[in-house]
Image (spheres, rainbow, N blue to C red):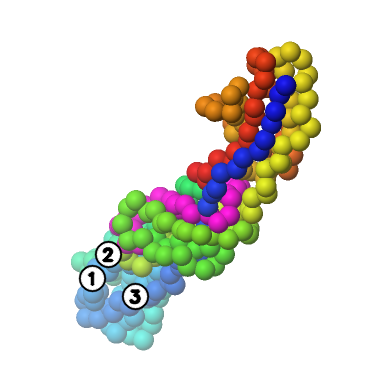
Amino acid sequence: MTKFYSMVRSILPAVILAITGWSAGAATTNVVIKDFAFSPPSVSINVNDSVNWNWTGNSHTTTSSTGLWDSGVHNAGASFTHTFGTAGNFPYFCAVHTFMLGSVTVSSGNLPPAVTITNPAPGAVFAAPWTGIIQATASDSDGNVSAVEFFRNSVSLGIVSNSPYNLAVTNVAAGAYVLKAVATDNSGATNTSAGVSISVVGPVPITISDPVSVSGTQFRLTYTANAGLKYVVERSSTLANFSGISTNVATASSVNFTDNAAIGVQNFYRVGRLPNP
């Protein structure tokens, strides 16, 4: 005669969220055209910044050596502005006095760092209370990452200053959460990861029901579960030395299981919930 009973195992997890962005306003750099010189003769700016030339002398131009701009001839009191939309080095001269030379160096500016939450996976389900690790990767193409801050539904969970960017969370209660991470680079630029939605659920008691001997080698049972949590079905012929015969992630609140190797005079079955990953 086949007997059955249920058995459970405990578990724990947590969560995170954040918001931030990086932006920089365009700037204007002034160059004075006086006597027979540009002052200063060379300037460095970022993409989308502007240079404004101001005349204090007469009959001068600011003319791009590549034809990008040409102010025309102006006298004292005039001004001319050009905005630079691409990075590069842009030499220029005065078309009236060709020995007057200047240059504008345009850089891409400080790029924000990249950041991604790598664990837990989107849609992950944990049993409450959840204790676990939130992991992120972060990098900066033109500098280095100085810190990664983790958030759960806009609440800061903590800051990690060095790689690997892992943060431990403990005793997270049941609920739906969005986790985010905000990386900051050495120049102060920030970037926010895509949100990762997870669920922490209160585990239901495991109850085995509807035992059926389908055939001489098949035995079927049903057990209660939480969708998204992982369970193991174990079997023993002596109520000792149970062996796992099936491990699965539940897709519904009720799981049907069939043992296709139910041989022997009698077997005992138990179902346990596995710990959070």
- Spot occupied by residue 133 in the image (x, y as percentages of width and height): 44, 52
Q: In the image, is 166 to the left or to the right of 221? A: left
Label 3 environment density (alpha carbons within 10 Å; few <14, some 14–19, many ≥20): few
In the figure, residue 86 lies in which quadrant?
Answer: bottom left
- Spot occupied by residue 147 in the image (x, y as percentages of width and height): 35, 62
Q: Is residue 144 above or below residue 247?
A: below
Q: Nearer the viewer, residue 136 or 100?
A: 136
Badge 3 marks a residue whose secondary structure is strand
- Spot occupied by residue 32 in the image (x, y as percentages of width and height): 28, 79
Tag of residue 29 = 3
Does the magenta segment cover residue 185? no
To which residue does mark 2 refer? 103
Residue at left offset 27%, top offset 69%: 43
Q: CA distance from mark 2 to mark 3?
A: 13 Å
Label 1 environment density (alpha carbons within 10 Å; few <14, some 14–19, many ≥20): some
Residue at left offset 54%, top offset 60%: 172
Q: Decide: marks 2, 1 in contact (CB < 8 A)?
A: yes
Q: Decide: marks 2, 3 in contact (CB < 8 A)?
A: no
Residue at left offset 60%, top offset 48%: 125
- Mark 3 or 1: in front is 3
Circle 2: residue type = Ser
Residue at left offset 31%, top offset 57%: 162
Label 2 environment density (alpha carbons within 10 Å; few <14, some 14–19, many ≥20): some
Circle 3: residue type = Thr
Residue 96 makes an appearance in the image: yes
Which residues are drawn in magenta? 122-147
To which residue does mark 1 refer? 41
Q: Nearer the viewer, residue 28 or 196?
A: 196
